[in-house]
Image (cartoon, helix red, strand yellow):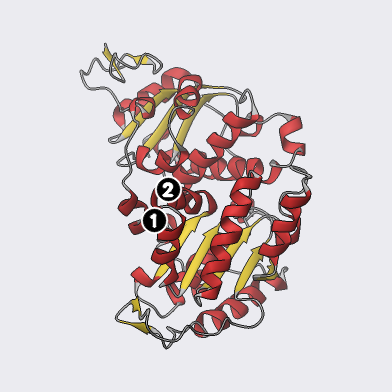
C-alpha cells in the first residue's frame, strides 16, 4: 500500500494498488503550485484544446444561420485589426502622438448558450489576427483578474496596452469589485487602441442579472456594454449533438484500477479534492493540472455550497481546456449542482461545467475499457 499524497497533507485518499505495485498515481489534492506573474502573461494564448481552432474548422449548424454569420463577422473583424502608427518593434512609442480613440464599439461580444462553439470562434479570431503572439492575448475572465492581481493595475495596462487584440473567454462577473476593475481596465485598453473580443452566456447589458441589485454595479455593466458589438450565436450544445448520453459513473475499484494503469493519471477522493480547492487560488488550478493525463475521482457527491461549486467550475474549465479525461465513481455529473443552484444567477456556469465534464467523461471511455 502507498499513499497517493504526502503524509503532511492528510485530506487526500490512501489508495492501494490493485496490482500490488509500489508507485501510486498523483493526487491533485497534494498540489499547491506557485505561479509566477510572467507565466500568467506568457500563457495568455488559446488553451491546448483550441490550438488548432480556425474559422474553416468551425462547423456551423445549418439550422442556425447565426453561426455562419458569426464566422463572417469575426473574419472581417480580424482583417480590420491593425498595428497602429504608434507601434514600432512591438513596443509603443510613448513620445508619439496618442492616437484618437476609435469611434463606436471597439470589440465584439459573442453571446450564446453553452456548447455553441464560442470559444472555438474566439480562438479562431486570435489565430486569424495578423499580429505576433506577444501582441495578442487570450484568457478567461478569471485569468484576466488574476493577472491584474499579480502585476497590479498600471502594469497590466502597460503590458496589454501594446497589444492589438485581447480575447476574454467566459466573461462572467462574480462580484462588483471585479466589475469596476475590469471596466476600468478595458476602458484604458480601448483608449490605447486595443481591439476586444469576449464570449459569455449572457448579453453585456444583462451581466450580473440575478446576482446583485446595486445601482453602482448595474451602472458599471452599462459602461462595459458600450465597448462591444453583441453578436448572438444560437444553437444547441454541440457536445450533445448526435452523441450518446454521458457514461454512468463506475465503481471505486474500476476508477482506482484505471488510475494505476494509466500513465500520468491522478487519483483523488472527491470531497477531499473539493476541500483542497478551497485552499488554492483558482489562478493556480491550471498549473495544478500540469502533466496530468487523466483525472480519476472516487465518491463524487453533490457540491455542498455555492463557493465550492464555483471553484469546481474553474477546475472543470481548466481540465476541459487541457483535454484531460475524467473517470468517476459516485453521483453522475448532472447531480453535482442542486436545483436551487441551477435556477440561480450562476446557472449558466454550472450548466457549462456539466456539459464539459460530460464530454471529458466520454473521452475517458477507452481508458476504462482498455480499448
User: How many residues crowd around disc 1 within 10 Å: few (fewer than 14), some, or many (20 or more)?
Assistant: few
Q: Quadrant of residue 110?
A: bottom right
**Measured along the vertical axis of the image, is residue 180 above or below residue 160?**
above
Tell me the quadrant of the picture where the N terminus can be found: top left
Q: Nearer the viewer, residue 240 or 31?
A: 31
**Measured along the vertical axis of the image, is residue 335 above or below residue 94?**
above
Q: Position of residue 23 (x, y in %)?
A: 22, 22
* Mark 1 lies on residue: 48
Q: Secondary structure at mark 1?
A: helix
Q: Secondary structure at mark 2?
A: loop
Q: Is residue 145 visible?
A: yes
Q: In the image as oriented, which residue stretches furthest toward the top?
A: 1
* Residue drawn 48% across the image and 65% down it: 123
Earlier sequence position, callout 2 versus callout 1: 1
Tell me the quadrant of the picture where the C terminus can be found: top left
Q: In the image as oriented, which residue stretches furthest toward the left?
A: 22
Q: Nearer the viewer, residue 125 or 35?
A: 35
CA distance separating discs 2 and 1: 7 Å
Q: Is residue 58 visible?
A: no
343 to the left or right of 295: right
User: How many residues crowd around disc 2 within 10 Å: few (fewer than 14), some, or many (20 or more)?
Assistant: some
Q: In the image as oriented, which residue stretches furthest toward the front?
A: 95
Q: Position of residue 340 (x, y in %)?
A: 76, 31
* Mark 2 lies on residue: 323
Q: Quadrant of residue 134?
A: bottom left
Answer yes or no: do the residues labelled 2 and 1 have beta carbons within 8 Å? yes
Q: Position of residue 203 (x, y in %)?
A: 72, 60
* Residue drawn 31% across the image and 54% down it: 38
Amino acid at each position: 500500500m502507498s499513499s497517493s499524497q504526502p503524509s503532511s497533507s492528510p485530506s487526500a485518499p490512501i489508495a492501494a494498488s490493485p496490482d500490488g505495485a509500489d508507485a501510486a498515481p498523483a493526487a491533485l489534492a497534494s498540489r499547491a503550485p506557485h505561479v509566477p506573474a510572467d507565466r500568467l502573461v506568457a500563457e495568455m494564448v488559446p488553451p491546448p484544446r483550441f490550438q488548432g481552432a480556425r474559422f474553416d474548422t468551425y462547423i456551423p449548424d445549418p439550422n442556425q444561420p447565426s453561426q455562419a454569420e458569426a464566422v463572417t463577422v469575426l473574419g472581417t473583424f480580424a482583417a480590420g485589426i491593425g498595428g497602429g502608427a504608434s507601434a514600432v518593434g512591438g513596443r509603443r512609442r510613448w513620445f508619439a502622438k496618442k492616437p484618437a480613440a476609435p469611434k463606436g464599439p471597439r470589440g465584439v461580444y459573442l453571446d450564446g448558450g453553452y456548447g455553441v462553439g464560442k470559444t472555438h470562434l474566439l480562438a479562431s479570431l486570435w489565430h486569424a489576427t495578423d499580429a505576433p503572439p506577444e501582441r495578442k492575448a487570450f484568457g478567461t475572465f478569471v485569468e484576466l483578474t488574476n493577472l491584474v492581481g499579480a502585476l497590479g493595475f498600471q502594469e497590466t495596462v502597460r503590458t496589454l496596452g501594446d497589444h492589438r487584440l485581447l480575447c476574454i473567454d467566459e466573461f462572467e462577473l462574480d462580484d462588483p469589485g471585479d466589475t469596476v476593475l475590469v471596466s476600468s481596465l478595458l476602458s484604458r485598453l480601448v483608449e490605447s487602441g486595443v481591439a476586444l473580443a469576449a464570449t459569455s452566456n449572457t448579453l453585456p447589458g444583462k451581466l450580473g442579472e440575478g446576482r446583485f441589485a446595486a445601482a453602482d454595479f448595474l451602472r458599471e455593466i452599462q459602461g462595459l456594454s458600450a465597448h462591444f458589438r453583441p453578436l448572438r450565436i444560437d444553437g444547441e450544445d454541440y457536445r450533445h449533438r448526435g452523441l450518446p448520453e454521458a457514461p454512468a459513473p463506475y465503481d471505486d475499484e474500476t476508477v482506482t484500477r484505471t488510475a494505476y494503469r494509466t500513465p500520468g493519471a491522478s487519483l483523488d477522493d472527491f470531497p477531499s479534492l473539493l476541500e483542497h480547492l478551497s485552499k488554492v487560488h483558482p489562478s493556480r488550478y491550471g498549473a495544478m493540472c500540469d502533466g496530468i493525463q487523466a483525472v480519476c475521482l472516487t465518491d463524487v457527491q453533490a457540491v455542498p455550497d455555492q463557493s465550492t461549486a464555483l471553484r469546481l467550475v474553474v477546475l472543470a474549465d481548466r481540465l476541459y481546456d487541457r483535454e484531460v479525461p475524467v473517470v468517476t465513481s459516485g453521483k453522475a455529473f448532472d447531480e453535482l449542482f442542486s436545483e436551487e443552484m441551477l435556477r440561480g444567477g450562476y446557472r449558466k456556469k454550472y450548466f457549462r461545467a456539466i456539459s464539459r465534464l460530460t464530454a471529458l467523461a466520454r473521452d475517458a471511455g477507452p481508458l476504462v475499457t482498455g480499448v
